[in-house]
Image: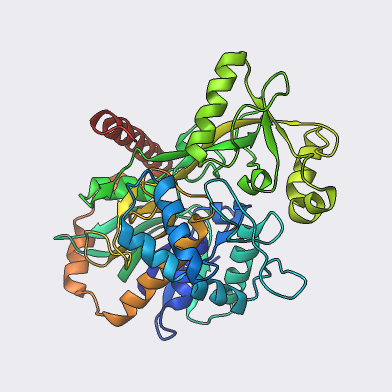
């Protein structure tokens, strides 16, 4: 049983790629706590199949920038998009240095795949489990650091703040039942998306937008909370729970979508929201609960080497992708809105940062381009860590104690009920945002 200390230099909420890369890039003389609601592998980073984008060369910049802006309906922040693209090569080098095994060509160069919305192949990948490969390698590196403690089964219930300054978090250990009030010089929300509030989602069910609700409670700015991406192709099932994603790169490598009569009905390489609309329209026209995805146009050897997890999962569900089509349906997948943050991950509250899917820095606009998520999370988490290091200062302990004393502890007497109220708060905020300014 791990007993948490009262004071950490930095508390990071979330153990996906954003939280881990933030921890890796903070100074080694800082005492860092990384907490997560469940085990570290219960992050959407771990589930990412397709890959991670990389600027191929200087000639690719205009095309990559244009593809990202087009997918986002030109609601993206151009400065944030440029920052992400310009830093992508260095970031991939960082991952390779951490031991990430990206696919290679015969000459040893990086192999690239293509996904919907991309004008050319520029996506690095490891089979069809790139997220698991990256997250596992980063976690191994983080766990080797003596200054970083990773603790599972700890849920953040609130922040301690006063006068628009954050002094740490209120957290509940689900194993020993203890409620912690932890001081921190800096707090980083890297707690992922909000798929758990939807009935059909590719996300883990524990991801319910708690950090978002906490920020709404304390007046921390959020943006585009109704900008929610639907993934076009998840494996159809009548069972409840998380939906298994069929990677965008399957279509990027040649798979096609078919209607109930097994006729092709759309351009599979359009951005995700366009393909989703086409699928939903076809389902309505056909009166069906799914459409069909045919992977047989892809060479068998490529399917075996690039998509082994998808092949196996389909087999487990009774479908042989080499002999038949598989049923697919759209499901909630990604959150483009979130806690407002800048290029360094700073929120509108002092000492509070937000990185990864839980934040909104403008890079995705109204619709995320495939395989930009891991890249964005990793780059801006690193920038947040560097910003903390460059501007480091201690909290005023007297102010922190005052913030702690002002807490209403009755609020945390039933944390599961509190989280349900947070879920309702998020859903209501999404509804209000959609009424005020519908997503493009």
x then y, percent, for residue 29: 41, 86
Query: What's the residue at 29%, 62% (across, down)?
Result: 342
Residue situated furthest front in the rendering:
59
Query: What's the residue at 70%, 66% (across, down)?
Result: 103
x then y, percent, for residue 177: 47, 53
Question: From the image, which quarter does the C terminus lie in?
Answer: top left
Foreground: 343 or 199? 343
x then y, percent, for residue 334: 47, 44
Q: Is residue 237 visible?
A: no
Q: Is residue 94 above or below residue 299?
A: below
Question: From the image, which quarter does the N terminus lie in?
Answer: bottom right
Q: Is residue 177 above or below residue 345?
A: above
Q: Is residue 43 above or below residue 388?
A: above
Q: Is residue 265 visible?
A: yes
Q: Is residue 368 left or right of residue 141?
A: left
Q: Is residue 228 left or right of residue 17?
A: left
* Image quarter of residue 56: bottom right
Q: Is residue 85 left or right of residue 297?
A: left
x then y, percent, for residue 213: 32, 45
């Amino acid at each position: 049983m791990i007993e948490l200390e009262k004071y950490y230099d930095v508390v990071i909420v979330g153990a996906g790629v954003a939280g881990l890369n933030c921890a890796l890039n903070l100074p080694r003389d800082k005492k860092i706590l990384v907490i997560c609601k469940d085990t570290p592998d219960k992050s959407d980073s771990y589930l990412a199949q397709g890959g991670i984008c990389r600027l191929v060369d200087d000639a690719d910049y205009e095309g990559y920038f244009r593809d990202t802006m087009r997918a986002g309906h030109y609601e993206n922040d151009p400065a944030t998009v440029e920052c992400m693209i310009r830093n992508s090569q260095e970031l991939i080098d960082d991952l390779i240095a951490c031991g990430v095994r990206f696919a290679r060509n015969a000459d040893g160069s990086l192999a690239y795949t293509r996904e919907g919305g991309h004008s050319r192949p520029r996506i690095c990948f490891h089979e069809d489990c790139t997220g698991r490969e990256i997250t596992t390698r980063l976690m191994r590196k983080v766990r080797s650091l003596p200054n970083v403690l990773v603790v599972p089964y700890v849920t953040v219930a609130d922040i301690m703040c006063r006068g628009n300054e954050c002094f740490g978090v209120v957290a509940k250990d689900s194993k020993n039942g203890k409620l912690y009030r932890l001081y921190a010089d800096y707090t980083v929300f890297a707690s992922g998306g909000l798929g758990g509030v939807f009935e059909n989602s590719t996300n883990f069910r524990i991801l319910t937008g708690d950090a978002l609700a906490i920020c709404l409670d304390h007046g921390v700015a959020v943006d585009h909370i109704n900008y929610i991406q639907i993934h076009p192709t998840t494996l159809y099932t009548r069972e409840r729970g998380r939906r298994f994603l069929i990677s965008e790169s399957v279509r990027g490598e040649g798979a096609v979508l078919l209607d109930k009569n097994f006729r092709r009905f759309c351009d599979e390489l359009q951005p995700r929201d366009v393909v989703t609309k086409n699928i939903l329209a076809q389902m309505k026209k056909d009166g069906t609960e799914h459409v069909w995805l045919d992977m047989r146009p892809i060479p068998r050897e490529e399917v075996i080497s690039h998509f082994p997890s998808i092949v196996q999962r389909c087999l487990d569900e009774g479908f042989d992708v080499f002999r038949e089509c598989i049923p697919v349906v759209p499901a909630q997948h990604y959150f483009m809105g979130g806690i407002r943050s800048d290029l360094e991950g700073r929120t509108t509250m002092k000492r509070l940062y937000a990185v990864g899917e839980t934040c909104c820095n403008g890079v995705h606009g109204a619709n995320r381009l495939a395989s930009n998520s891991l890249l964005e999370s990793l780059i801006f988490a690193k920038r947040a860590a560097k910003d903390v290091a460059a501007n480091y200062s201690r909290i005023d302990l007297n102010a922190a104690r005052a913030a702690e004393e002002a807490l209403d502890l009755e609020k945390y007497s039933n944390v599961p009920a509190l989280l349900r109220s947070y879920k309702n708060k998020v859903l209501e905020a999404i509804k209000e945002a959609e009424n005020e300014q519908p997503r493009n």
